[in-house]
Amino acid sequence: MLRRFPHLTVLIFGLLTAAVFASAVPAEAQTRACLGREEQRAAVASNKAIPLAEALRLLRARGIRGETVRASLCRRDGKLVYVLTLLARNGKVSRVTVDAGSGETIAGR
């Protein structure tokens, strides 16, 4: 039957491939959506998130230091979090997650 309908074969293969790739995406990435610049500004202005500079200051006060390579304000499990990539002086790269509402470190060093 598949020989008679080659388009059906391509369709089935495409659907199976899409299903495999969709299941390969971690659940964390599926539940996390990062905000755009305007959404970030609105979240800080409405006091739903502390400013990024404040989050970085709190990290330094806890002894977590490094140059900020990347910073994103994202939604994770119904909360706003900063996902930070830091580069230490020794060249080690680390990822730290900070609760954007309270400034508490959630994950990372």
Image (cartoon, grey):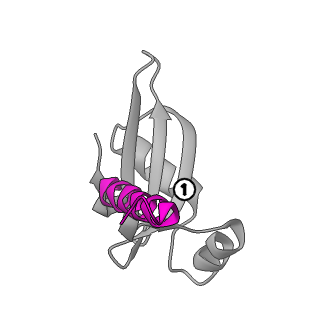
Is 97 situated above or below 103? above
Residue drawn 35% across and 56% down? 25
Is 70 situated above or below 75? above
The mark tally for this picture is 1
Q: Which amino acid does label 1 sit on?
A: Ser
**Residues in magenta?**
1-25
Q: In this view, does 38 lie to the left or right of 25?
A: right
Quick one: 7 or 46, which is closer to the camera? Answer: 7
Quick one: 50 or 107, which is closer to the camera? Answer: 107
Residue 76 falls in which quadrant of the image? Answer: bottom left
Residue 19 falls in which quadrant of the image? Answer: bottom left
- For the question of whether residue 97 can be seen, the reply is yes
Q: Residue 31, image x and y in percent?
A: 37, 70
Judge whether residue 69 is colored magenta.
no
The residue singled out by tag 1 in the image is 72
Q: Residue 17, image x and y in percent?
A: 39, 55
Residue drawn 42% across and 66% down? 32
Where, quadrant-wise, is the C terminus in this rendering?
top left
Question: Helix or strand or loop: what does disc 1 sit on?
Answer: strand
Main secondary structure type of the part rendered in magenta? helix
- For the question of whether residue 104 can be seen, the reply is no
Residue drawn 48% across and 56% down? 55
Q: Is residue 43 left or right of residue 26?
A: right
